[in-house]
Image (cartoon, rainbow, N blue to C red):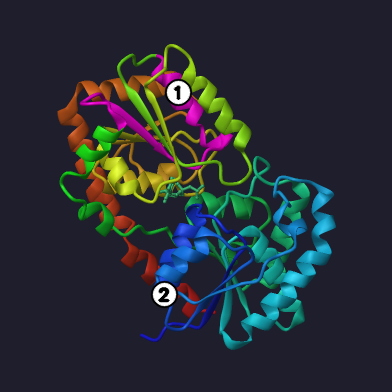
């Protein structure tokens, strides 16, 4: 099958979950398509390493500084957004359609349709609620989506429902679950976990990992609070503050240095070897305090054959059947989290059974192949 010619657009330079998901899509589409980025950095390097054509047009700082949760301050970025829209309209000429992978890319791509730009597909990977979006930004995004976009692809039912609840048109929405390739998890060298444990110097101590950028709502502090009830357990925090949340990273460092946790918290920063790191631990936890749009790390934990404990909100509840393919705990509840971790560590046979069922579920439901089938079908309708 010949794939559509797509101009993928994203504003980010760094590798968040949205960018890692786009990496897989753009790799599959690299013979016909191209990625346009508005900032240079590790994302461009990863795309080029996968032989994807990339064009970087550095955006004015006023756009990169806008926060979706900010109010009317976004108005200041209007001239820059207009400029960005022009770039998208011009760059899109050789393609059948524009795929907007981030909020800022979507707003600019939608405006570009007023300048003769190609049809836009918005890949919505955020829960559009007051927690993350100011009412002004929500209204603008929904208005542009309803009037200027051909389709809104949503990465979970929760993401789609939030869009519709915010006034988005239901007929625009297509569910395209993320898919994660299992090869990096299935093909790990047998001694890789032991090497990581050696580097951490933790011997056989129980190890529980969180694999998310450091950000208050990702809730790494909830695991550190839970650790206070779990005297011998070590925590692995993998990820760094990607979008200007250095203060939260310092807060976590201070928590980790407290006497009751000292030596038990291992903060590794951003890593490219998440599959090996997950396999080195006993349990993968997801601690978001607010609804997670999808939660790639949950599926990755399942593919790593580790029991996964996730915060029960948003897309996470679509990925885990509680007690069958993982465990769900109330978001922000460190006591409940400590209890589930303690139970899993004390019953390794039950933990293995949970992990095995999670693995089968993730492989069946969230494969890269299923993602691409759904994505191809959606784009062929534009
Ligand atoms: N990740 C990574 N290195 C890190 C921390 C996280 O590669 O140090 C990856 C993680 O494996 C996952 C993605 O970043 O694929 C995070 O995606 P998720 O959907 O969980 O959260 P998002 O960043 O989209 O909010």
Is disc 2 placed on a helix, strand or loop? loop
Could you say which is closer to the camera, residue 138 or residue 52? 52
Is residue 223 within the magenta segment?
yes
Residue at image point 42% right, 17% down? 261
First in sequence, mark 2 or 1: give its number. Answer: 2
Is residue 304 among what the camera can see? yes
Q: Quadrant of residue 179?
A: bottom left
Residue 195, image x, y percentages: 23, 39
Residue 269, image x, y percentages: 46, 40
Mark carried by residue 51: 2
Mark carried by residue 224: 1
Is residue 175 within the magenta segment?
no
Could you say which is closer to the camera, residue 211 or residue 139? 211
Quarter of the figure with the N terminus:
bottom left
Is disc 1 placed on a helix, strand or loop? helix
Label 1 neighbour load within 10 Å: few <14, some 14-19, many 20+: many
Q: Quadrant of residue 194?
A: top left
Q: Which range of residues does the magenta coloring cover?
A: 200-228
């Amino acid at each position: 099958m010949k794939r559509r010619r797509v101009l993928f657009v994203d504003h980010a330079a760094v590798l968040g979950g949205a960018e890692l998901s786009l990496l897989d899509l753009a790799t599959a589409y690299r013979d016909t398509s191209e990625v346009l980025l508005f900032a240079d950095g590790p994302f461009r390097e990863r795309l080029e390493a996968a032989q994807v054509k990339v064009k970087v047009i550095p955006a004015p700082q006023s756009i990169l500084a806008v926060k979706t949760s900010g109010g009317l301050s976004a108005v200041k970025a209007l001239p820059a957004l207009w400029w960005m829209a022009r770039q998208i309209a011009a760059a899109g000429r050789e393609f059948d359609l524009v795929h907007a992978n981030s909020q800022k890319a979507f707003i600019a791509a939608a405006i570009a349709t007023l300048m003769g730009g190609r049809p836009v597909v918005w890949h919505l990977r955020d829960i559009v609620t007051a927690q993350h979006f100011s009412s002004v930004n929500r209204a603008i995004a929904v208005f542009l989506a309803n009037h200027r976009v051909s389709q809104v692809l949503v990465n979970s039912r929760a993401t789609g429902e939030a869009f519709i609840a915010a006034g988005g048109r239901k007929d625009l929405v297509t569910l395209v679950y993320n898919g994660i390739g299992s090869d990096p998890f299935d093909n790990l060298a047998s001694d890789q976990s032991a090497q990581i444990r050696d580097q951490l110097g933790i011997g056989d101590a129980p190890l529980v990992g969180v694999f998310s950028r450091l950000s208050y709502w990702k809730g790494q502090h909830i695991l550190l609070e839970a650790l206070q009830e779990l005297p011998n357990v070590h925590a692995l925090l993998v990820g760094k503050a990607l979008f200007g949340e250095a203060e939260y990273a310092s807060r976590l460092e201070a928590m980790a240095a407290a006497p009751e946790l000292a030596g038990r918290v291992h903060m590794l920063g951003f890593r490219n070897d998440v599959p090996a790191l997950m396999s080195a631990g006993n349990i993968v936890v997801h601690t978001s305090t607010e609804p997670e749009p999808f939660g790639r790390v949950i599926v990755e934990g399942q593919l790593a054959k580790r029991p996964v404990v996730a915060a029960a909100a948003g897309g996470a509840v679509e990925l885990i059947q509680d007690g069958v393919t993982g465990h769900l705990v109330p978001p922000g509840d460190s006591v409940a989290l400590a209890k589930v971790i303690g139970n899993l560590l004390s019953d390794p046979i039950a933990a293995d059974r949970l992990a095995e069922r999670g693995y089968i579920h993730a492989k069946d439901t969230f494969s890269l192949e299923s993602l691409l089938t759904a994505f191809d079908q959606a784009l062929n309708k534009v």
